[in-house]
Amino acid sequence: MSTTSTSKFAPKTPVQLDPPKYDPITKKELAEYDGVQKPQRYIGVKGVVFDVTKNIQAYGPDSKYGVFVGRDASRALGKSSLKEEDVDLKISDDISDFTEKQLKVLDDWFSFFSQRYNIVGKIVQ
């Protein structure tokens, strides 16, 4: 098990994380990890899948960030958006039109997730 490193994105209380797993997960399979179809809650960021199940307050069914669950949230995170269209399964990972600022915001979110949640997979086509 590894502990998180010290950075501006590190949680206040260090989190023990399991070694990352990069099991292949399709978008269709990822959609099943919504807390309903399967009990786990997964979120994809930059093609990496994080298990956010332990944070039901933030990623539960009626929570502010529940819209990200079961999807690659890259587009929405980079745009700082909670809009449904930004987590549409067809375009949620398309960041080809992002500005440098949006790419930086997305990188910051990736760092945030990386220091708090276990990596359980990698999104494949």
Image (spheres, grey):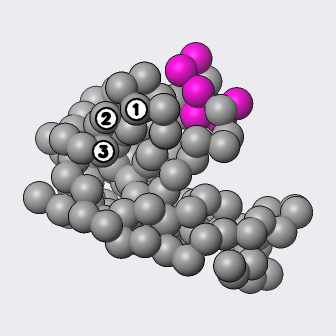
Asked if labels 3 and 2 touch by Cβ distance under 8 angstroms, the answer is yes
Q: Quadrant of residue 28?
A: top left
At mark 2, the secondary structure is helix
Which quadrant, please, contains the N terminus?
bottom right
Percent coordinates x, y for residue 103 in the rendering = 41, 67
Q: Name which of mark 2 and mark 1 comes first in the sequence.
A: 2
Q: Which residue is drawn at 25% across and 64% down?
A: 24
Q: Tell me which segment is drawn in magenta.
A: 57-62
Of residue 41 and residue 75, the one placed in the foreground of this image is 41
- Looking at numbered disc 2 in the image, what kind of residue is underneath it? Glu
Residue 99 appears in the figure: no
- SS for callout 3: helix
Q: Which mark is residue 30?
A: 3
Q: Position of residue 27 (x, y in %)?
A: 21, 47
Q: Residue at x 30, y 44 (%)?
A: 30
As measured in the structure, the alpha-carbon distance from the residue carrying label 1 to the one carrying label 3 is 10 Å
Residue 94 sits inside the magenta stretch: no
Evaluate whether residue 61 shows in this view.
yes
The residue under label 1 is 38
Q: What is the quadrant of residue 74 in the picture?
A: bottom left
Residue on which the image places disc 2:
32
